[in-house]
Image (tube, rainbow, N blue to C red):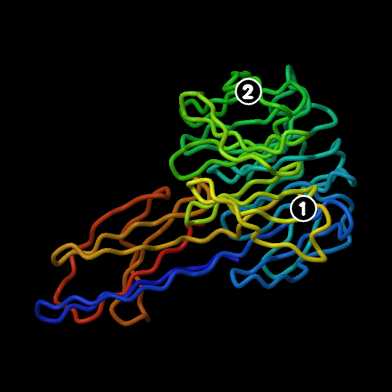
Amino acid sequence: MVTRSLTKAVYTATVLLMYFHVSAQNLFVADYNGFKGVYQIKADGTQSNFISGLNTPSSLAFDKVGNLYVADAGSSTIIKITPAGVTNTVASGLNFPYGLAFDQAGNLFESDYGSSWIYEFTNHNGTVTSNLNVFASIGLNGPVGLAFNSASNLFEADFKSGKIYEFTNRNGILVSNLNVFVSGVTNPSGLAFNSSNILFVANDTGVGSITRVMPNGTTNNFASGLAQPFGLAFNNAGNLFVANQNQQNIIQITPDGTQTIYFSGPSTNYPSGIAFAPTAQLHAAIVNKSIRLTVACPSPYFSAIVESSTNLMKWTSIYTNMAPFTFTDTITAAPYRFYRSVLAP
């Protein structure tokens, strides 16, 4: 599920030509009721079943290497599915798990709606442990959506209180103290950050709107006319995708607020959590005899590696950073220079 994007730079005398290909993103959708599984929508609009036989899958999250994690609310479990389709239970004994989010270190956080707790599952050498470690347990009231911003602070949608709480990262340690980031939101559910660190909140029951929250906490309405929106996800192009539950479809909203139906079909019974398979998207622009490379990815906590090659056989890492980022590489006299970007493990 983790894919690369490739750029080719050609330098001959004073003529510089460039071709680039950006890998398409696949959207994964948890269907809460009816199908009760996860299906995949490819960029060309075709849909296929990814996993079935779940109870009531509510939320999805990918780790950095492409494993998909599913919060199965009805069975009180978290399911892991590898890119090869191998399935196993990561955690059980939860109380209506609703939200999932990974931090930069690969630790998994889960919002437990029934207990009003947030659990942390620690990453040990690339494996998420099954131990139930309570991260926050006091003051929450129906935690649902979770999301990290680019500063590695955790945000939680508190469904019953109408608040968004922020848990601050201090020198690499996430503090469990409750800080109200914004209040007065009606039944907040899904959360998602765009590449500019702006938070988008799905207002679930009876409102049918998306609230945009600036980094300073000011709010405005971004979209309305939806029908119980829940899961939110951004693609690499900066478009917001919404699991529109009561209309049984997936809505795409461009940065200027234009809404279109991205997908609807027989499997779209009750879409809940949605997530794009992680990719590193590479853009390029020519500046004199240099190439300016810009890397983006759908979530702010992914790091990406840019590699270069002259023969597509031997690749050399030339830059690593947390996406999105831009850097410039000088093109040498070599006739061909290829670049590719991949998410860092």
- Residue at numbered disc 1: 271
Looking at the image, residue 319 lies above or below residue 331: above
Mark 2 against mark 1, which lies toward the viewer?
1
Q: What residue type is labelled 2?
A: Ser
**Residue 314 - label:** none
Q: Which residue is drawn at 56% across and 58% down?
A: 278
Give neighbour class at mark 1: few <14, some 14-19, many 20+ (Cα, 10 Å).
Answer: many
- How many numbered marks appear? 2
Q: Where is residue 81 in the image (x, y as percent from the top left)?
A: 73, 60
Image coords of residue 135 (percent x, y): 69, 28
Q: In this view, does 5 lie above or below 90?
A: below
Question: Which residue, given by chain and number where applicable, does mark 2 sit on?
Answer: 176
Is residue 30 placed above or below 12 in the rendered structure?
Answer: above
307 on left or right of 95? left
Left or right of 297 on screen, residue 285: left
Q: How crowded is mark 2: few (under 14 residues within 10 Å), some or many (20 or more)?
A: some
Residue name at image x 57 percent, y 38 percent: 200
Residue at 78% from the left image edge and 51% from the top image edge: 247
- Identified by mark 1, the residue type is Pro
* Relative image position of residue 285 (x, y in whole percent): 26, 63
Residue 289 picture location, percent across and down: 14, 67
In front of the other: 306 or 162: 162
* 102 relative to 87, above or below: above
Q: Which residue is drawn at 47% across and 29% down?
A: 215
